Image: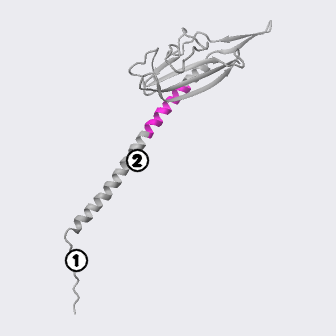
Amino acid sequence: MRHSSLSLQVPGFALLEVIVASAIASTIAAGACVVLSMTIRANHAARVRTVATMVAARKMEQLRSLAWTHISTSTPAISLSSSDVTTDASNDPATDDGPGLLASPPGTLTSNIDGYVDYLDANGRWIARGTTVPAAAVYIRRWSVQPHVSDPDNLLVFEVIAGTRGISQSLLGDAIHLAGMEARK
């Protein structure tokens, strides 16, 4: 006796397999698109915060590099305080027509006060200074110099805020706030 092998031929079964496979592939692709979109947004936010941190740190170092020392004479032995009171740190390069390390006026960290604000492009390069935000500015950087209450003659507090230009062009989005102190040497 011969066994004949019968193969089942069900019409439309191949079409159903293709539809199920397509649905699975579409679901995976949609999930991958969502993950990719989230990754791109996170990467952009990280870049913005990294540049803001770098420009804030750069301004902090610039302020710390200004003269804030004691000068001692040998005969007679006298110690005099010396402080930079002329550097304009809002220019790039800095010029000699600014407030240096004099105490900042109120509000320098919350508004654009000339001499205590500058504007940078998307790569953190200096563009301009002043109270009006230029169209090309992506980052706003503000700073404050204040004598410390415990020893105002020998201790300064520096604060720098840097972040992206906000909706009103004066608010900072993704702001980085750095603070540091400098003692007379």
Seen in the picture, residue 78 relative to 127 is either above or below; the reply is: above
Q: Residue furthest top?
A: 76
Going 20% across and 68% down the picture, which residue do you hit? Answer: 12
Q: Residue furthest left?
A: 11
- Quarter holding the N terminus is bottom left
Magenta part of the chain? 42-57
Instruction: Determine the main secondary structure of the stretch shown in magenta.
Output: helix
* Left or right of residue 165, residue 53 in this image: right
Question: Hey, what amino acid is under mark 2?
Answer: Val
Going 38% across and 47% down the picture, which residue do you hit? Answer: 34
Going 68% across and 11% down the picture, which residue do you hit? Answer: 82
- Residue 162, percent across and down? 51, 26
The label on residue 35 is 2
Give the image quarter of residue 22: bottom left
Question: Hey, what amino acid is under mark 1?
Answer: Leu
Q: Earlier in the sequence, mark 1 or mark 2?
A: 1
Q: Residue furthest bottom?
A: 1
Seen in the picture, residue 123 relative to 98 is either above or below; the reply is: below
Q: Nearer the viewer, residue 70 or 39?
A: 39
Membership of 146 in magenta stretch: no
| Crowd band around label 1 with a 10 angstrom C-alpha radius: few (<14), some (14–19), many (20+) | few
| Crowd band around label 2 with a 10 angstrom C-alpha radius: few (<14), some (14–19), many (20+) | few
The label on residue 8 is 1
